[in-house]
Image (spheres, rainbow, N blue to C red):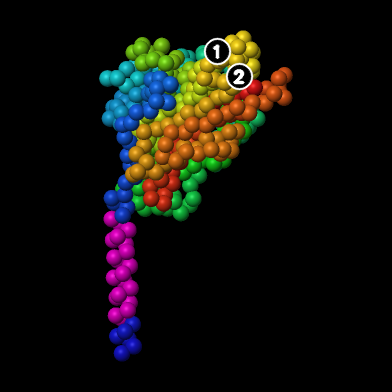
């Protein structure tokens, strides 16, 4: 009797395990997280009319250690609705010299270069001549001579980290680098990626959307008065994993990595269609922090804006510097007008941010950060925040404050920090 009960209970347990495995399989198979965007009017957005384009930055091809041909990858990026594409093969600008830069049915491609220095890998955007690997100061000097942008690559990647965080002169930092994202994952998540990739690559790769806390702390710490550092998202795609000495596999696919995270650039007007002019526009926008980055795998951001307006009517965007000392002297205006002035009766700056997410289906928060610390949030609505406590004690050395936003999106109980803006500096 005991043997019979043991056999029956064992079979029941095995059946229950099998059912759980089947349920787990189907959960993974049909797993999808998509943000629901809506068309809505925002009076505040109308204050900041800029042209937004989205781009895929930093990937490797057959020109270095990638597995893809540039022509194939341009086709892939077009299918994924990217506006521009920037390669960054190691220590070479040969794609440019081979005449591949240009427009391809609306998509703009140009070549950058990932350059080896004694401190780590350094990304050069917007350059016209190849720069040889060498000392950081020499590489940076050459980038500046060519009016390019110099960006620290994957600063906290344990495989190829940046080794000197006290260097100066660079323009930006890769905050999201997908190669670093998977290397920095919890080992359990790595196992989940390996075992679920074939079932549903979206499920496997959505783990890459974790927040790179260490890199963000570094980014916040290096913002200096009138010398802000731009944050970007980079694919760092190779699709070329070494399995054995002779065997390599195309994992993850370029199409998947190109979908995960992108950098979105704000321009004053539409691209002109001229290679040199548009390369310069995009490079300058990135260099000046006129951009944001997001995990586009959950949906390409729609309607995002982040800016500020001062009491004297001037408008500012990410990457801008606001000097409160230059605002109109309200008391003097009062005396000169017999006490009657316009609606702006005090010195202030109002920060605005918003995005067209359907908060009923996907609750979200817009979080405002000052000098790396969260100071204010708005839930399912545009963010409006007034600043009027400018320091009067730092006339010779203005006290800088750096403001940026992050957007958290909720899928049930799951929270993803979906979007990151660059900074606006306010000093007085």
- Picture coordinates of residue 296, whole percent (x, y): 38, 35
The nearer-to-camera label among 1 and 2 is 2
Residue 18: in magenta span: yes
On the rendered structure, is 31 left or right of 353? Answer: left
- Regarding residue 268, the answer to whether it shows in the image is yes
- Mark 2: which secondary structure? strand
Report the residue at 60% width, 15% height from top. 339
Q: Are marks 1 and 2 in contact (CB under 8 Å)?
A: no
Q: Is residue 80 left or right of residue 87?
A: left
Tell which circle, 1 or 2, labels the residue nearer the N-terminal end: 1
Instruction: Give the vertical position of 262 relative to 144 (above or below).
Output: below
- Mark 2 sits on what residue? 323
Report which quarter residue 312 is drawn in.
Answer: top right
Tell me residue 20's x, y (percent).
Answer: 32, 64
State whether the magenta stretch is mostly helix, strand or loop. helix
Residue bearing mark 1 = 145
Quadrant in which the N terminus appears = bottom left
Relative to 146, residue 85 above or below: below
Q: Height in image: 68 above or below 138?
A: below
- Residue closer to the observer: 165 or 336: 336
The region drawn magenta spans 7-26
Residue 115 in the image: state x and y as whole percent.
52, 25
């Amino acid at each position: 009797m005991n043997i019979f009960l043991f056999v029956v209970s064992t079979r029941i347990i095995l059946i229950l395990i099998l059912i759980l495995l089947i349920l787990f399989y189907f959960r993974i198979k049909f797993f999808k997280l998509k943000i629901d965007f809506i068309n809505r009017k925002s009076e505040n957005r109308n204050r900041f009319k800029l042209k937004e384009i989205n781009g895929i930055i930093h990937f490797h091809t057959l020109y270095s250690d990638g597995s893809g041909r540039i022509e194939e990858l341009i086709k892939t990026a077009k299918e994924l609705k990217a506006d521009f594409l920037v390669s960054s093969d190691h220590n070479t600008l040969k794609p440019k010299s081979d005449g591949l830069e240009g427009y391809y049915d609306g998509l703009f491609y140009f070549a950058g270069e990932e350059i080896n220095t004694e401190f780590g890998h350094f990304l050069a955007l917007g350059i016209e001549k190849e720069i040889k690997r060498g000392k950081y100061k020499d590489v940076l000097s050459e980038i500046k001579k060519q009016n390019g942008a110099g960006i620290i690559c994957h600063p906290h990647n344990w495989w190829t980290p940046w080794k000197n965080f006290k260097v100066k002169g660079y323009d930006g930092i890769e905050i999201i680098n997908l190669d670093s994202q998977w290397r920095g994952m919890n080992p359990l998540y790595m196992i989940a990626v390996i075992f679920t990739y074939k079932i549903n690559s979206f499920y496997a790769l959505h783990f890459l959307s974790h927040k790179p806390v260490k890199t963000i702390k570094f980014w916040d710490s290096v913002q200096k008065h009138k010398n802000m550092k731009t944050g970007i998202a980079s694919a760092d795609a190779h699709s070329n994993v070494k399995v054995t000495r002779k065997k390599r596999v195309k994992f993850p696919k370029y199409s998947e990595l190109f979908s995960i995270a992108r950098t979105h650039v704000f321009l004053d007007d539409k691209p002109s269609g001229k290679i040199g002019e548009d390369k310069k526009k995009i490079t300058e926008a990135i260099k000046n922090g006129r951009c944001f980055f997001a995990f586009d795998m959950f949906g390409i951001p729609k309607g995002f804006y982040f800016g500020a307006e001062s009491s004297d009517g001037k408008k500012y965007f990410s990457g801008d510097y606001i000097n409160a000392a230059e605002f109109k002297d309200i008391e003097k205006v009062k005396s000169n007008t017999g006490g009657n002035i316009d609606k702006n009766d005090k010195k202030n700056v109002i920060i605005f941010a918003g995005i067209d997410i359907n908060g009923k289906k996907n609750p979200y928060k817009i979080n405002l950060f000052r000098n790396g610390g969260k100071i204010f949030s708005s839930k399912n609505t545009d963010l409006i925040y007034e600043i009027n406590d400018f320091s009067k004690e730092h006339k010779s050395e203005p006290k800088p404050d750096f403001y940026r936003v992050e957007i958290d999106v909720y899928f049930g109980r799951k929270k993803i920090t979906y979007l990151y803006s660059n900074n606006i500096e306010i000093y007085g």
